[in-house]
Amino acid sequence: MNIVSKIESEQFKSDLKPFNVGDTVKVHTRVIEGDKERIQVYSGIVIGRKGTGINENFTVRRVSYGEGVERVFPIHSPRIAKIEVERKGAVRRAKLNYLRSRKGKSATTVKDQVVRG
Amino acid sequence: MSIGLLGKKIGMTRIYDDKGRVTPATVIEAGGNRILQVKATDKEGYSAVQVGYGDQKPQRVGKAMTGHFAKTSSTPKRFIREFRLADGAAAPESVDLPVTGFEVGQFVDVIGQSKGKGFQGTIKRHNFHGQPMTHGSTMHRRNGAIGNRSTPGRVWKNMGMPGHMGDERVTVQNLRVLQVRGEEGVIIVAGAIPGAKGTFVVVRPSKKKTVKK
């Protein structure tokens, strides 16, 4: 095995739950203030995933007090304690950049994924 | 404490530290370093250690070098460099120089041959600004004026001009060692080092920056 991919795979998170573009997620981030550490939760819709392996990032968009906010997280960062999937979304594209130009409810929701039984 | 090692640039990646900060890092393969000759002041006139790295096929080595390798019963090496020893410093006892001679957190200098860029203009080669692309300008990426008038009546030395860029010896100083992997013979340093993947490099303890203890 290539040594670089070995170094990278050592840093992968083993407990990573799969999630996709369109899902509504809660991202638990570790925030260090002085010498105290606490968990901050950021929730929103995953509007894109980018990169592979250790370089993979995902963007979470939410509308907070009428202002659109996007945060980009590296998937394998130790500062991310947990990624919780709240709702599965049914989307047909890899990047949901069209949400940026939307207003009101259509900007904050995507269609739920119907689980076929 | 290592006198320095020879190695090969493997590639770059990113390393997360214990605080979750991400550092761009270069992986250097430096296993199998071997001392080929110890040079002494009374014999060679200066004190140094000759080190070899990277196996070479025996049929590619001439008779003179074959004899040189046989003196220390070493396999033929592709990349051979010397490390000067400080006055009175003794050479390492073991002929094998493991990567574990470097410590995590110490600073190193890395010397290598940079990527060749070919014949380049002054904008890329010397960070000149160039001229306007529009507004009637017909002079875009030229080097511009190179001197004054009859005083000094000549072009100053070291005036930036187009020419060959890259493919030269480059030293990058004060790179922090992030990891030392003894089993794989690999050291990981923070930041970039010269050259393409597969370039032979010299890794030596930093000349300027040492860890405060």
Image (cartoon, coloured by chain):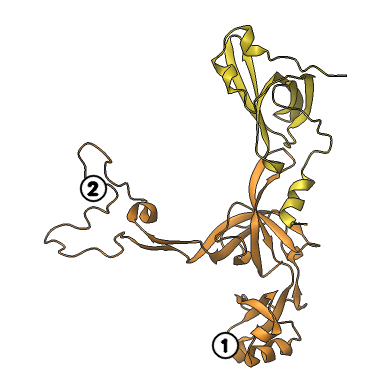
Identify whether B19 is placed above or below B124.
above
Viewport quadrant of the N terminus of chain A: bottom right
Identify whether A88 is placed above or below B157.
above
Chain that is coloured orange in the picture: B
User: For this view, does B81 lie left or right of residue B180?
Assistant: left
Q: Earlier in the sequence, mark 2 or mark 1?
A: 1
Viewport quadrant of the C terminus of chain A: top right
- Circle 2 packing at 10 Å, graded few (<14), some (14-19), many (20+), is few
Dots 2, 1 in contact, CB < 8 A:
no
Count of numbered circles on the image: 2
Q: Which label was assigned to residue B139?
A: 2
Residue at 56% in and 65% down: B111
User: For this view, does B60 lie left or right of residue A15?
Assistant: left
Task: Look at chain A in the picture and name its colour.
Answer: yellow
Which residue is nearer to you in this view: A95 or B172?
A: A95
Based on the displayed image, in which of its 4 quarters is residue B193 positioned? bottom right
- Give the CA distance from mark 2 to mark 1: 57 Å
Identify whether A107 is placed above or below B22.
above
Residue type, mark 2 in image? Met
The secondary element bearing badge 2 is classed as loop
Residue type, mark 1 in image? Gly
User: For this view, does B148 lie left or right of residue B125?
Assistant: left
